[in-house]
């Protein structure tokens, strides 16, 4: 009866496994092609975000037309490195402006306050046809120039400027020689430059407020420490940027912390200055740019350059999301880029729903084609439940594979902040004791779960084979012989485990995956566990039952 029922069930579902398999594969492919990730950003989304927004060359042209050749030159340098269209024409226009107005080259543009301060004989020499840009701090180092600036600021009515000038009288410093002592020219020049920047409204509102509070706190405490690091970072920036380049950047800088982070980036990666500067100005969020570059290192700067190629809104999107750009993103549908950009949460849910439904359809097809014909109606319900569990596990594996930065991690933070403490440098470098706790990354966890899922499937197949033998209407002795014939199947967990370990080790040697012995040998461990459970928990008790049944079935011999 059971055989007839199975035959009827198979006849009624003969074509179903094929369309289930096709539908599952189509859903998995659809989910894979959606250009949305949780821990990275597809270049397609950047292209969609930047469409119609001002390009980097157009941004540089707007700076040039505003008589700001200094910032425009750095933007042009960034565009030249990215080989953007129109860069040559922008460079030609800037060169023509430099020949027509050489007096703008030295400072990087026009500043009415500078014209007032350095009027007459104390004004810096006007640049010639071969004019070059000068670092902002350079004009404040000569003693005559500093006295000129000090005299101009002496009549200021700004409380913030007065508080900044008062810090020059502080004699307790850590990173600088005090401004009133011999050798204190750099600090004195930096203080005067900061005061003139504040007087000329070159500092953003939040930054100006924070600088003033730090200056007042330093004056009250008699120590330069509250504002000393800011002076040091501003001096570092003013050695690399001219006056207008520095001022334009400070106008969008929100706080002192960002000044320190940007100065650190320019110290460790001066060749990346044009891209970082252009991204800061174009996005008007230098804090987001510096945080992104420090978090992801050179890979993060490469991501910023990718966004700069696409336009202003692409840079803002990347800085807002704070995730790495996936340069080797798989083929994706351009059609869904707009939806993925506007509704990232919804599209992410759709993507992983496609993964789960697709894998579930595939397992359902395999169940109906391979396992279903030999199961009873009651056991088919359990079969579908197991398919759902396996679909959940394997859809999780697909999720991780579609998120490359979950497996290999984010780009290294090779531009991170480095803090130097003079007091510790005198007694030697201190090293933190290595942590005894083992660090297990996400890729290791995913690999272990995958090997575990494979062994669960092997265990399930072994159980199905035992149930198939158990349902056959043959004597117990024949069933026992059939069980012995399947010994190789019951040992397959060990074979699969060894194969998984060997494959993982080979891939590690070839450099395809990161070296990780824990993940590799977990396959072997799960194989041993699977075989032990099959043979001890299932095969041995069932064989014992068959042996007893076969003995009871043998008739007793009559007594002689």
Image: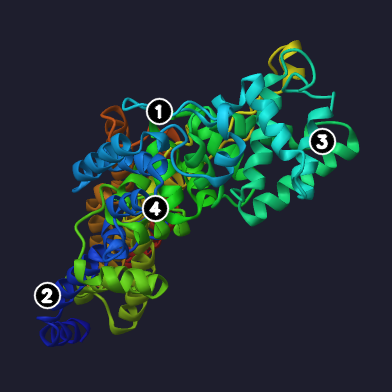
Residue 67, horizontal then vertical, whole percent:
39, 48
The residue nearer to you, when weighing 159 against 508, is 159
Which residue is painted at 67% across and 33% down in the image?
Answer: 149
Q: Nearer the viewer, mark 4 or mark 3?
A: 4
Can you identify the residue that label 1 sits on? Answer: 127
Compared to 336, does 128 lie above or below? above
Which comes sooner in the sequence, label 4 or label 1? Answer: 4
Query: Is 68 on the left or on the right of 157, as rendered?
Result: left
The residue nearer to you, when weighing 402 against 315, is 315
How crowded pointer 2 is (Cα within 10 Å; few <14, some 14-19, many 20+) is rated as some
Can you identify the residue that label 4 sits on? Answer: 66
Q: Nearer the viewer, mark 3 or mark 1?
A: 1
Which residue is painted at 73% across and 32% down in the image?
Answer: 228
Q: Nearer the viewer, mark 4 or mark 2?
A: 4
Residue 174, horizontal then vertical, whole percent:
77, 23
Q: Quadrant of the C terminus?
A: bottom left
Q: Is residue 341 in view?
A: yes
Q: SS at mark 3?
A: helix
Is mark 4 in CB contact (under 8 Å) with mark 3? no
Q: Nearer the viewer, mark 4 or mark 1?
A: 1
How crowded pointer 1 is (Cα within 10 Å; few <14, some 14-19, many 20+) is rated as some
Q: Could you tell me how far apart the alpha carbons at marks 2 and 1 are, in whole angstroms?
A: 79 Å
Can you identify the residue that label 2 sits on? Answer: 18
Compared to 127, does 560 lie above or below? below
How crowded pointer 4 is (Cα within 10 Å; few <14, some 14-19, many 20+) is rated as few
């Amino acid at each position: 009866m059971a055989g007839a029922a199975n035959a009827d069930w198979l006849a009624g579902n003969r074509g179903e496994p094929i369309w289930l398999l096709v539908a599952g594969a189509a859903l998995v492919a659809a989910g894979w092609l959606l250009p949305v990730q949780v821990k990275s950003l597809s270049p397609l989304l950047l292209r969609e975000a930047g469409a119609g927004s001002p390009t980097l060359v157009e941004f540089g042209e707007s700076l040039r037309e505003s008589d700001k050749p200094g910032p425009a030159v750095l933007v042009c340098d960034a565009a030249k490195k990215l080989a953007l269209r129109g860069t040559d024409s922008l460079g030609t226009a800037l060169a023509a402006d430099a020949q027509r107005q050489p007096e703008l080259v030295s400072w990087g543009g026009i500043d009415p306050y500078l014209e007032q301060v350095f009027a007459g004989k104390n004004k810096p020499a006007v640049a010639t046809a071969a004019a070059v840009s000068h670092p902002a701090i350079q004009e404040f180092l000569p003693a005559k120039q500093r006295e000129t600036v000090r005299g101009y600021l002496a009549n200021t009515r700004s409380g913030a400027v007065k508080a900044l000038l008062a810090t020059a009288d502080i004699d307790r410093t850590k990173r600088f020689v005090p401004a009133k002592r011999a050798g204190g020219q750099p600090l004195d020049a930096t203080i005067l430059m900061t005061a003139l920047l504040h007087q000329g409204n070159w500092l953003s509102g939040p930054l100006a407020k924070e600088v003033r509070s730090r200056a007042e706190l330093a004056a009250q405490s008699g120590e330069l420490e509250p504002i000393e690091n800011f002076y040091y970072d501003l001096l570092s920036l003013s050695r690399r940027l001219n006056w207008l380049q520095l001022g334009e950047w400070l106008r969008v800088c929100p706080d002192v912390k960002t000044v320190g982070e940007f100065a650190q980036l320019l110290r460790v990666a001066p060749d990346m200055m044009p891209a970082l500067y252009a991204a800061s100005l174009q996005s008007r969020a230098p804090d987001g740019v510096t945080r992104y570059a420090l978090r992801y290192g050179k890979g993060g700067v490469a991501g910023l350059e990718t966004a700069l190629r696409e336009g202003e809104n692409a840079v803002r999107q990347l800085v807002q999301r704070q995730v790495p750009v996936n340069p080797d993103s798989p083929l994706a549908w351009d059609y869904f880029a707009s939806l993925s950009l506007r509704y990232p949460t919804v599209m992410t849910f759709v993507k992983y729903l496609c993964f789960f439904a697709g894998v579930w359809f595939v397992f359902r097809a395999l169940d109906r084609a391979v396992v279903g014909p030999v199961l009873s109606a009651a056991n088919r319900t359990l079969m579908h439940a197991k398919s759902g569990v396996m679909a959940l596990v394997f859809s999780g594996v697909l999720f991780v594979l579609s998120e490359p930065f979950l497996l290999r991690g984010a780009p290294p933070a090779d531009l991170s902040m480095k803090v130097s403490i003079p007091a510790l440098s005198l007694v030697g470098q201190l090293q933190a004791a290595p942590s005894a706790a083992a660090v297990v990354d996400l890729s290791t966890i995913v690999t272990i779960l995958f090997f575990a899922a494979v062994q669960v499937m092997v265990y399930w197949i072994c159980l199905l084979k035992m149930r198939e033998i158990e349902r056959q209407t043959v004597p117990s002795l024949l069933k026992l012989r059939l069980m012995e014939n399947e010994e190789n199947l019951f040992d397959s967990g060990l074979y699969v485990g060894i194969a998984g370990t060997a494959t993982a080790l080979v891939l590690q040697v070839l450099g395809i995956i990161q070296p990780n012995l824990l993940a590799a040998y977990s396959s072997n461990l799960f194989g041993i566990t699977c075989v032990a459970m099959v043979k001890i928990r299932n095969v041995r008790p069932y064989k014992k039952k068959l042996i007893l049944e076969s003995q009871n079935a043998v008739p007793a011999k009559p007594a002689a």
